[in-house]
Amino acid sequence: MQEKPELDFPRPLTTVDVVIFAIRSDALQVLLVQRPKAESEPFPGAWALPGGFVDIAGDRDLEACAVRRLKAKTGVVSPYLEQLGSWGSATRDPRGWSATHAYFALLPEHTAGGALAGDAQWFAVEGEKVRPKLAFDHAEILQAAVLRLRNKVEYTSLPAYLMPQEFTLPELQRTYEIVLDRPLEKSAFRTRMLAADLIEPVAKMRKGPNRPAQLYRLKKAKAPVFFTRTFNPPG
């Protein structure tokens, strides 16, 4: 077996960071982790996106690293994971030249409410930011993730991955409105969702103060649906 040649040049630090979104308390929220407080650590005690170094022996690719970091902090695998972009410079990490490859993930409400790692906590997204100051360049990465999510929600079915296992059409519409931060026209939304071959009715009704509402679920193994037009606000 041929031996691998020795590298005669310095290598940058290589990490993967994951922006994990969920709908909690009727708001778009993102999962953050608190960094170790030891003074030897960069940005001690600051809040940051979940992430870490690539495991050269264990991670077959960048996505495998992202899945591993996601599961380590939430205990679950996201139904939707997308590569966001790469950030790198000589100054983003005080330990040396660093490059990070960022992903964003969507978690359904019922999994986002589960047990988290001890250093993890949900924070509401306000505009394109969160209240705590973030370590490294994670504020820039978070902003890019929020913009990507909102742009794609305009013409895709991504919010369906934020839903619980069973939901009503008004609940799905509300999730779209939370992510987009604006209201949508009810009848046009209903028509688009039912025509998209994305959801299917279940043999249950949601009882409430008004007439019972039909429950739906996301079709299994369904890729995101792309719409030909963006959503219009109410007239």
Image: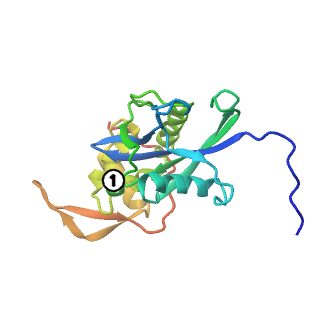
> Does dot 1 land on a helix, a strand or a loop?
helix
Three-letter code, disc 1? Glu
Residue plotted at (32% across, 58% down): 164
Query: Camera-side residue: 94 or 68?
Result: 94
Residue plotted at (41% across, 28% down): 132
The percent position of residue 179, horizontal first and vertical second, equals 39, 41
Q: Is residue 68 left or right of residue 174?
A: right
Residue 87 appears in the rendering: yes
The percent position of residue 110, horizontal first and vertical second, equals 32, 57
- Splitting the image into 4 quarters, where does residue 120 fall? top left
Q: Is residue 109 left or right of residue 152?
A: left
Instruction: Quickly name the residue at label 1.
Output: 109
Q: Estimate how packed mark 1 is, as few (under 14), some (14 to 19) or many (20 or more) residues with alpha carbons within 10 Å.
A: some
Q: Height in image: 17 above or below 138?
A: below
Residue 225 appears in the rendering: no
Q: In the image as oriented, which residue stretches furthest toward the left?
A: 209
The percent position of residue 69, horizontal first and vertical second, equals 52, 52
Residue plotted at (63% across, 31% down): 93
Q: Is residue 72 left or right of residue 206?
A: right
